[in-house]
Image: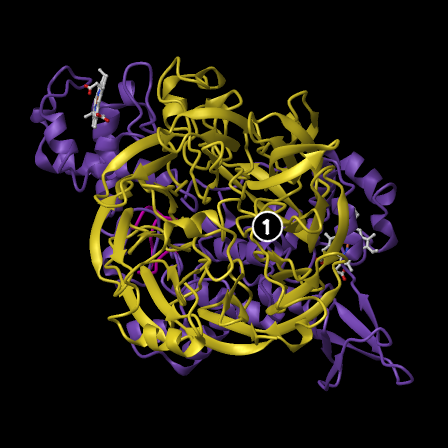
Amino acid sequence: MAIAQSVLLCLAAAGIAAAQEPAPSPSLAQSRQVVQKVCGVCHTPESVITGGRTRAQWQETIDKMITAQGAKGTPEEFATVLDYLSSQYGPASSGSTPGGRGGRGRGAAPGGMLAGAGPNDKHVVDEAAADRGRKVWAAECIDCHGTYARGTDNGPNLVRSELVLHDRYADKIGPFLQTHKMQSGALGNTLTAAQIGDLAHFIHQRVYDTLRGSPIFVVHNLLTGDPQAGKAYFNGAGGCHNCHSPTGDLKGIASRFDPPALQARFLNPRPLGGRGGRGGRGAGTAESTSPGAKPVTLTVTPPGGPAVTGTPIVFDDFDVSVRDVNGEYHAWKRTPELKVVKNDPYAAHDELLTRYTDKNMHDILAYLVTLK
Amino acid sequence: MKLPGIIASLALLSAGLWGQTGLDSRKLLQPPIDTWPMYHGDYSGRRFSTLTTINSSNVQSLSLAWSYRTGVGGIKATPLEIDGVLYFSAPDHVWAVDARTGRELWHFAWQSNGGIHIGNRGVGVYGNWLYFETPDCNLVSLNLKDGKERWHKTNCDLDQFYYGSVAPLIIRNHVIAGVSGDDLDRPGYLSSYDPETGDLQWRWYTVPQKKGDPGSDTWPNEDAMRHGGGMTWQVPTYDPELNLLYVTTGNPQPVIAHKNRAGANLFTASLVALNPDTGKMAWYFQASPHDTHDWDATQVPVLIDGEINGQPRKLVALAARNGYFFLLDRTNGKNLVTSPFVPTNWAKGIDRNGTPIPDLAKMPQIDGALVSPNQGGATNWPPPTFSPQTGLFYVGASRAYSVYYIYDTDDNPQGWGGTDRGGANLGSMVQAIDYKTGKIRWSHPWESGGRSGLMSTAGNLVFTGDGSNNLVALDATTGAPLWHANLGASVGNGPITYQLDGAQYVVVAAGDALWAFVMPKR
């Protein structure tokens, strides 16, 4: 279900985070405040941050918060959120929980700060042990249980096994193997305790690899389109050439973005909404300094008064306010006499979403990747 | 029980007097006036109040009564209001707060063993007892009077990555409890517990558990169906006359990569009618056959006593996450209306049962498929409302596109095996749907997004939240925005209303705070 449930970006209220972590440097504290402001609106502090994500994965999550959940902030604030989450909750962080591999490093996490799927005391995978276990697996188990432990005609799926899910550090798998016949024909009781422990790490790793955010949870080849057809669409039905040129603003775009990021980018080129995908490292500043970072503005004309244009701060049925180019703040109550016009440079791209076929989408990408 | 204001407040403060009776079970069968006794206000799920003290001509003078901050986290729960006390929850926490003043009466905190803490939808109350689910899979019963724990029972297995988030529903001597969790491939189910002992009365699995069970012909094999998902994230609705419970079910598993579950995958992404005494299914209607977009159908099945072609009819309406509004005859599940409430691009048409036919090309692809709605859905869990006065079904909706990818290319994918990324939200709005036809009567777009729960009243009002952190009152007939209050955080639940001492209150959650607005007695 539910975006509410599937969303893993869950952020600490500044206060709670501060209470449970070592005294932060001032800049960290400030970052945390921004995180709280932008994200705290929707998320409960206890559900907090699920770590173990790369910068690109965090970017993807943030993008989703913006496009699907309507998270709001300035480009600078989102960049701060990204920096904060990537540095504090990156792959190497103590905050790694499933999402990564089911709670690697979970033991080191401050209690209550993290919430991921499954119990707090879940099996934490030791990568080196899992690698050793892989060899035992290949020698004694793989024929029946399969490369990914998902089962074959000769043995059941262990990823779905309740015995495995209840296991901690071979306390269930170990006893079970004692009488289990292996590939060599020998019983599992001929394995050493260390080998059995390693096998348990390997099997739990296979379970965690099926979770969202795992190392195998990645985009594959997106370049299935026809570059010629993409070019024709660019210059024809798509109308892209009216606003872009392959030798002008889009020159070299393929060296700035890898294919997944590029696909996300042309589908939604907003400074943040479209900045997703791998290769997003440093994209925050890259985008805000790129000529592409065009702001959405409002032009507000009070009855008799001069029109004011600026970036929207508040915009709803009752109030409107903008910050103009000089940094001046202007606010009005909305009335029928007050004219408000939204200038959205991304409207054309939004409209394109309703027109693209999947073939168009693949062809455009195939064409854009040629713009090295 | 009608007491003059002063005596009632005194009674509240004196523990000896207050709470002796708990919730009078007759309240469960009456329209919510001085009480909001269950998650949806009443069994119908329509979240409509007959109160008119606040109405479209005076709502401008609705004013703040109080606010209460939990300091703990985002409130997604719809509070219950019983005898002048509000009861609500956040993951691992329950509070009792004076409904007139916002004063805390008690706070219960659960020691957690884990589970996803993304949200808790609320509590159920039976007599003197309160029930709620914890993220670590427990159904907990508290004493309504002081918040002391009476017992807790295991509702799910945390090791299988299930968790608890949904509000229990009380029907006579049944505590109906759903289950959450879609990280691993596990079956969904709905359980009924004895309100006194907490003993399990029955459990209905949303997916067949063996070959030959109803629906098993829509799965390739036993392994697939037994791990086929279908979580019960939503609070059911109930028709006391028909004695049928209306349950909506979640997405099948694996969620996105779907090679190993060919077929319609019953009874996932469906609306089913169960007998609440036995857990036996009476009928089903599937909203998304073979769902591959994490859309599920766990929106609120709203019961409407309406009229079709001049004939009085018992109906049930569902505005599903997949973008379609469905109207069924709730005696037998026969479809009467299927109509998109926002434009979508994933279905090739509607079959003769009224079910959308998924377009294979719009299922997730390795190189991506551009799909609308996105995973967030055309709508989501925040509750809609139906006003019998206007005949309109109001739902918070979005039109969004994203690209669905397969990540796990194995023939036997597990878990999610893919997701959606990117795209854009083209707009969020309140859709007012004519229930008889599914046609949009009016649409109120939000300038800055937003999608919250709704409530309608006989005062010709619809209350909901916008994307600017406002609680907004719309004219129920025209959709015109009439009143707002900025709460500093977006509305996180469905608003409720009740009348005490002649004054009508509207209570809503935003962030970690509960806000109460009041219109004094006329």
Q: Is residue B319 visible?
A: no
The range drawn in magenta is A91-103
Q: Out of A281 and B385, give the one closest to the viewer.
A: B385
Helix, strand or loop at disc 1? loop
> Is residue B93 rendered magenta in the image?
no
**Overall secondary structure of the magenta section:** loop
The residue sitting at 69% across, 36% down in the picture is B307
Q: Compared with residue A84, is residue A362 higher up or lower down, i.e. above or below?
A: above
Chain identifier, purple in the render: A
Chain identifier, yellow in the render: B
From the image, tell me which residue sits under label 1.
B384
Where residue B217 sits in the image (x, y, percent)? 47, 15
Three-letter code, disc 1: Pro
> Is residue A98 rendered magenta in the image?
yes
Residue A303: name its quadrant: bottom right
Left or right: residue A371 versus residue A191 is: right
